[in-house]
Image (cartoon, helix red, strand yellow):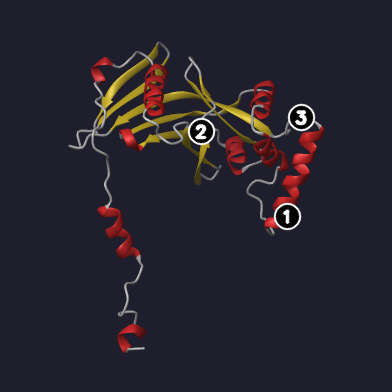
Amino acid sequence: MSEADARGGGRERDGPGNIADLLRALPVFPPGLPQFDPRSVPADPVSLFWTWLRDAVRDQVPGPQAMVVATADDAGRVSSRVLLCKDVDEAGRWYFASSAGSVKGRELAVNPRAALTFYWPQQGRQVRVRGTAAPAGRQASAADFLALSPASRAEALDGHQSQPLDGLNELDAALRRAQARISADPSLVAAAWTLYAVPAEDVEFWQADTRRRHIRVQYQRTADGWKHRLLWP
């Protein structure tokens, strides 16, 4: 081995500099982004969300129902993860589900503030929702649980999310036990499974533009209904 090789100079080294170069070289937006005229937006954010969601489905955006859900604990430490949006109703409530014993469930119990973000990169679109999450009720939570696939129900029934795991054999055994319980009782519902509703306080729609003339429209809930305004990009 040469002295240069011993110092790491004889080969390309992976490191923060190379990662930064790679990230800067990646394209940011695809060509042919859709047009968005903020002068013609509907009066409420749910109607616009529905239009954008249908556009994402039509254009075969992978997982258009996926969203980042951000929560924080009582000390203000933020965590986030990707979940599936379960519904959006006319009252402007966005829904997701999880175990009340999970990290997100425990955080929402002490700090119910939540932020949701949808990102549809093929269209250069984001939708951001902020509000205070609350359980939608036991009946709605049970209905959501029973609508899950058997595998998803078994995973949720186990009830050890985010806890330390000794090995995959332990996981496999727990899933087999949960699957057997579900097979024996198809109406079984995990006691901690919770459907959360997030009544939006504000919703922002962000449309990218290749000229960096991005368009941002923010809806805010007021006592008189929804109001919207443009924001600087």
Would you name the residue on which mark 1 appears? 170
Q: Residue at x 51, y 30 (%)?
A: 85
Q: Specify the label residue 186 is tagged with.
A: 3
Locate residue 17, reporting x and y percent. Answer: 30, 64
Of the residues under marks 2 and 1, which one precedes in the sequence?
2
225, above or below 1, in the image: above
Q: Secondary structure at mark 3?
A: loop
Would you name the residue on which mark 2 appears? 113
Look at label 1 and name its amino acid. Glu
Q: Secondary structure at mark 1?
A: helix
What's the CA distance linking mark 2 and mark 1? 34 Å
Q: Residue furthest right?
A: 184
Q: Is residue 26 left or right of residue 73?
A: left
Look at label 2 and name its amino acid. Arg
Q: Residue at x 65, y 37 (%)?
A: 152
Foreground: disc 2 or disc 3: 3
Q: State the residue in front, 25 or 69.
A: 25
Q: Secondary structure at mark 2?
A: strand
Q: Specify the label residue 157 is tagged with.
A: none
Locate residue 118, reporting x and y percent. Answer: 42, 33
Q: Residue at x 24, y 31 (%)?
A: 232
Foreground: disc 2 or disc 1: 1
Disc 1: CA contacts within 10 A as few (<14), some (14-19) or many (>=20): few
Disc 2: CA contacts within 10 A as few (<14), some (14-19) or many (>=20): some
Of the residues under marks 1 and 3, which one precedes in the sequence?
1
Q: Residue at x 58, y 40 (%)?
A: 104
Q: Is residue 92 left or right of residue 56?
A: right
Q: Residue furthest left?
A: 211
What's the CA distance linking mark 2 and mark 3? 34 Å
The quarter in which the N terminus is drawn is bottom left
Look at label 3 and name its amino acid. Pro
Q: How many marks?
A: 3
